[in-house]
Each structure stands twice: as C-alpha cells, then as structure tokens.
Image (cartoon, rainbow, N blue to C red):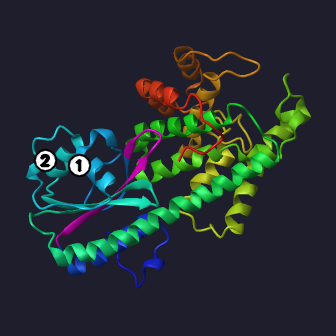
Amino acid sequence: MYAKPMDLNDHPSVMSKLVYLHVTTQEKFADISRIAVALYDKNTDKIKTFIYSGKPSPLNHYEAKLSDCYSLRNIATSHNGRIEQDLRVFNGSKHQHAQLIYQAGYRSSYTLPIRYGDELIGFIFFNAEREGVFDSACIQHLNLIGNLVALLIINELSDITTLASTMKTAIDVTHFRDPETAEHLARMAHYSRLICLNVADRHQLNDNFVEHLFLFAPLHDIGKITVSDNILFKQGPLNKVERKAMQEHCESGVHLIDKMLDNYHLTNLDHVQILRNVVLYHHETLDGKGYPKGLLDKQIPIEAKIVAVADIFDALTSERPYKSAWSNDVAFAELRKLAGTKLDTDCVTALIDGADEISTIQQTFQQLPSAASPY
C-alpha cells in the first residue's frame, strides 16, 4: 500500500487516490481491509472489475452480467447501499465473485451504487475480515468516502468522454463519414478489451489498465481527419506519395490528442500514455516494417499490439465497398498467418480463444444508431 501524503490531490491517478482514501479510512476504522470499484457497461450489461485497495484482489479481470446478480441488481434499482454483516448468507451462491470474496477471508461488506443522474456507472465495495463491522458511525464515514470515490470515477470517465466526444465532433465537421464507423469503433473497443483480459496476467496488466485501453481504443485512428478525402476514400491502391500522406495519420493523431488534452486541461488524465501509444503505434509490426517508427517486436507497447489485432480482425470481418465480410474462421486463419511476423502471437491467440465472446460482440453491435463511442 502507498505511503499517505498530505493531501488527496498529491496523488496523480484514480488508483492512488483510492489507496489514499483507504489509508485515511483505516485510521478511523481499521477493519475496512478492502475498497474496490467495478464499472457497469450498459451496452453489454456487464459489471467489470476496475480498481481496488487492499491485499491482492480475489477478483482480478472479473466480469459478470448485472442481470445475473440478484443482490447488485437490487442495489442498482433501489439506488440504496446494502450492508451485509455476515457474508455467510452468500455461502450457497453460485456466483464466482461471492465465493471468491468469502474464500479470500472477507466476512462482511457494504456496497454502494455509483450513479450519474439516471445512469448507473458502477459499484463501490467496502469489505472487512470480521462480521458485524458496519455500525452507524462506520457507515456514515463510508458514505462520505463513497461519495468522494464516485466523484473521482465520474470525473475520470467524464474527462475521457469529453475527449472522445470532441474528437467525434471533429470527425463529423471534416466529413470523415463511414457507414461502419460507429459499429467498428464499438466492436474493436470490445475486441481490445477481450484480448487485453486474456493477456493481462502474462503482461502484468491490472484492471485499471484494461478499462482505460477499452475507453481509449476507439480513438486509435483519430489522425485520419487530417487526411484528404481523395486519399482516404480512394478505391484503388495508393501511390507512393498518397501512401506517405496516409501513414502520417498516426503522428498527426498524437498531435491532435496532445492539443485536445492541453485545451481541455486534461494533461493529467489517468493513463494518457496508453492513448498516445495506441494512436501512434497501432500500425507498427513485429518485423520492423510498420509505421511510423519502424519499431521491432519488443519496442512496440502491448496496448498498440492489442489494438492492431482488434482493428485488423474487425476490418476483415466487416463488409466494405471493395470487399465482402470474411467469416470469423477465415479471418482467424489470416491472423494466424500474420502472427509472429506482423502481429503479436499472444494477442492473436487471445482473440481467437474468445470466439464465443466475439460472436456476442458482433451480435450486440451489428447496428448502432450513430457514430458514438462504446461507453
């Protein structure tokens, strides 16, 4: 656990702010041994682990459908917190999260919903390692801490949404319109998250990283708004000059991102380097023949490798004016050919291993009403 500085603002990230709030809470209520946050994705009805403070989490990279979670569903609909003074009430639960929490030694809990207006954002979980911890004084304090944590989470997500919405507006104004844009962005963001979850342990990526990659992935091609329409929509192959202009969209994208971060005073946005790496390096290849830097395998950030696989897979399986959509199996075969030379083998395997989830993503995002971000 981090040492506690003098003030909450001394911590740059949402994760470290949560740890700080946990430390201050334990000064008054030492039994509160875990604080965790899960986010809710209304498009897929999934609750997803995000950040936590305490001993190693029993629920890394975990997700579940809210509709399958009776207790959390009641909290979400009632808008009220729920106290469980003895977690043995869940001993018969079939849900993995209930079993894992109890097996990790937690014996009581207090759960609060995170809401923004009428929208459910997620949940905050306070846990203790003995029963009966949550008396009125403790609950009063945790409600204050819960409000602070909720504000931190909402502000973080709002900043990302502001950035994404501004970029979308820029795309619209410059007439960068593709009938597959909305669907593509949603699908490839979810493919990116699927891959990231499956390689997280190997690359020591926490849930905070996973969710930020999910949120940032749709901005990977933002630099294309600087490419002229006659190049962007050219039906035939690009000539050398046109290809060079097209390839400049990666570096142009980073410049746009940095300007937006500065203009909206978002330079301290959590994990912003993930965003820069995705935008700049998603066309790099393992053999050093990609662009814009010609990086070799180990030089390419994992987030860029993940987005590259997600982006190419969706392009292969989507219909375009110049091609029919490939089946998933044919696209998988093509990815296997590219694995090890162009694409990261672990990332390709991670996607293919999630074939069932891919089908769900494709069914969920077959048609979106507008070119919106997936969050």
Query: Over which residues does the magenta segment extend?
Result: 31-47
Q: Provide the secondary structure element on which disc 1 rests.
A: helix
Q: Is residue 237 above or below residue 329?
A: below
Q: Disc 2 to disc 1, how far (Cα)?
A: 10 Å
Q: Is residue 127 above or below residue 5?
A: above
Q: Residue at x 41, y 64 (%)?
A: 15
Question: Could one spot residue 206 in this view of the protein?
Answer: no
Kindly identify which residue carries mark 1: 71
Residue 190 position, x and y percent, is 51, 38
Residue 213 position, x and y percent, is 53, 48
Kindly identify which residue carries mark 2: 90
Q: In this view, does 172 lie to the left or right of 220?
A: right
Residue type for callout 2: Phe
Q: In this view, does 362 lie to the left or right of 85?
A: right
Q: Is residue 354 left or right of residue 279?
A: left
User: Which image quadrant for residue 78?
Assistant: bottom left
**Viewer-proximal residue among 287 and 60:** 60
Q: Quick one: which residue is furthest to the bottom in this view?
A: 6
As for residue 219 lying within the magenta part, the answer is: no
